[in-house]
Image (cartoon, rainbow, N blue to C red):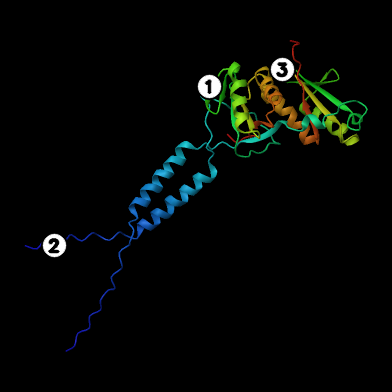
Amino acid sequence: MASLSLKRPTRPRALISLVPMIDVMLILLVFFMVTSTYLNLDMIPAARRGDADTAPQSSGDSAGSAGTVLIRLGADGVPVSRGRALSATELDQMLRTRLAEEPLTQVLLLPSGAARTQSLVSVMDIATRAGAVRLRVVRLEARP
Amino acid sequence: MKLARRTRPEPSETIIALIDVVFFLLVFFMLIGRMDATAPFDVAPPEALTGTDMPAGGITLAVSPEGALALDGVEIAREALGDTLQRWLDKDADLRLRVNAHRDAELRHVLPLVGMAEAMGVPDVVLVVTPPGSE
């Protein structure tokens, strides 16, 4: 009586061992997990080459005729325009009105040195959302 | 006497799945992480809605709430900053300076730095911000 035997095909052994590759990958994984920071960071431009060239040099040029809004920022972080303290909503409304009349209106921010960085960024945020395209931060320096 | 060679047990199939998972995690952490030098003090950047994505490259100047400075993670005195920035500028004329000021830092500690960098000819100075509620 003939017997039938089925042989399982033997799998060829891998030429390169996978274990060192797993080791290297794990080391890389731990390295990237430990050394990376995962904060969601954005940026707003503070100074850029060429900004000075685009600034109005005199009141007679076309940019100067667009008008200027000066906003002072007190030490308490409250924006003041034309002597009146403004809330965030009032500042937004005022800027939108001015920019609707004259889109190239220059917004000048004069912050107090004692104001916090967050208050300046918040006012810049409001001005940018209101549509200001010409926004400058100015500061007073003591005469040497 | 003939010594029989011990047969190594064949690796099981699950090792492939392990490699897949580790590789996926590796790519994930490489993509979402930023490899910035961290300042020796705690810095919480101001929140802003209108910030744009921060491009890579450049150096980071961190400012603590008390006005202490750190350039690329190394604490630096205010008086030494000018010389150090000049050396960076000599190496790279298109230098980008990221000012990462704590949101509670007073502007008298922050704005003179921006003015100094601008006066020195740093072509690109940016303020680091974070979207609201991202922490």
Disc marking residue B75: 1
Label whose residue precedes the other's in the sequence (2 or 1): 2
Image coordinates for residue A5, horizontal then vertical, percent? 22, 80
Q: Which residue is mark 2?
A: B4
Q: Are marks 2 and 3 on the same chain?
A: no
Q: Residues within 10 Å of mark 2 (few under 14, many from 20)?
A: few
Number of callouts = 3
Please give the name of the residue rendered at 76% of the width and 27% of the height, measured from the top-left corner. A88
Quarter of the figure that contains the C terminus of chain A: top right
Please give the name of the residue rendered at 58% of the width and 23% of the height, measured from the top-left corner. B84
- Relative horizontal placement of residue A64, taking residue B43 as reference (left or right): right
Three-letter amino acid code of the residue under disc 3: Asp
Residue lying furthest front: B90
Name the chain under label 3.
A
Q: Secondary structure at mark 2?
A: loop
- Relative horizontal placement of residue A68, taking residue B115 as reference (left or right): right
Three-letter amino acid code of the residue under disc 1: Glu
Q: Is residue A30 above or below residue B17?
A: above
